[in-house]
Amino acid sequence: MANHIGRVSILVNEYDEAIQFYQEAFGFDVLEDEKRSESKRWVVMAPDKTIGASILLAKAKNEKESAYIGNQTGGRVFLFLYVDSLDQFYQQISKHQVVIKRGPEVQAFGKVLVCEDLYGNLWDVIERA
């Protein structure tokens, strides 16, 4: 079996608002949603149920963690999402007032745009050439 990255955690304020954003704006599916304790849920989402890595929504549990919501990489792009059609993705996120930081534009490797998620994390969205 080959090694691979299976999941990345994203700090969020609230589970339900994050689920709603990633479902409606990005078109992600909830793969798992299990209550683990009174304050903790195990929420896993992905753009496709059959391939690639998924994201784990991790509700910040204290002020220190809350300070990193939306800035887990110090202002750099955090995640890279590959899509079949950047034009369709752009239309989808435009309906949900997603902040576009750059693009869409054509590069040597394909079409790309940089956008923010609900919390300000930067995503490169790429349609490969």
Image: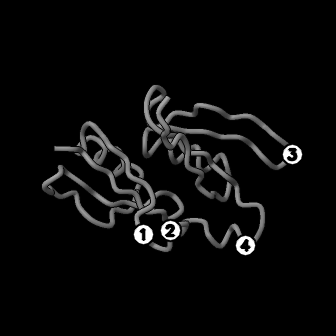
Q: Could you give the CA–CA distance between mark 1 and mark 2, rounded to whole angstroms?
A: 5 Å
* Residue 17 picture location, percent across and down: 61, 50
Q: Which residue is mark 4?
A: 64
Nearer to us of marks 3 and 4 is: 4
Q: Could you give the CA–CA distance between mark 2 and mark 3, rounded to whole angstroms?
A: 29 Å
Asked if 108 appears above or below 92 in the picture, the reply is below
Q: Residue at 31% of width from left, 44% of height from top?
A: 89
- Quadrant of the rendered structure where residue 103 is? bottom left
Asked if 31 appears above or below 37 in the picture, the reply is above
| Amino acid at circle 2 | Thr
* Residue 16 picture location, percent across and down: 65, 46
Q: Which residue is mark 2?
A: 73
Asked if 117 appears above or below 20 in the picture, the reply is below
| Amino acid at circle 1 | Arg
| Crowd rating for badge 1 (residues with CA inside 10 Å; few <14, some 14–19, many 20+) | few
Q: Could you give the CA–CA distance between mark 3 and mark 1, rounded to whole angstroms?
A: 33 Å
Mark with earlier residue (3, 4): 3
On-image quarter of the C terminus: top left
Q: Residue at 28% of width from left, 57% of height from top?
A: 113
Disc 2, SS: loop
| Amino acid at circle 4 | Lys
Q: Return the residue found at the far front.
A: 1
Q: Which residue is mark 1?
A: 76
> Is residue 120 rendered to the left or right of residue 30?
left
Give residue 38's mark.
3
Mark with earlier residue (2, 4): 4
The reply to whether discs 1 and 2 touch (Cβ–Cβ < 8 Å) is: yes
> Is residue 38 rendered to the left or right of residue 105?
right
Q: Could you give the CA–CA distance between mark 3 and mark 4, rounded to whole angstroms?
A: 20 Å
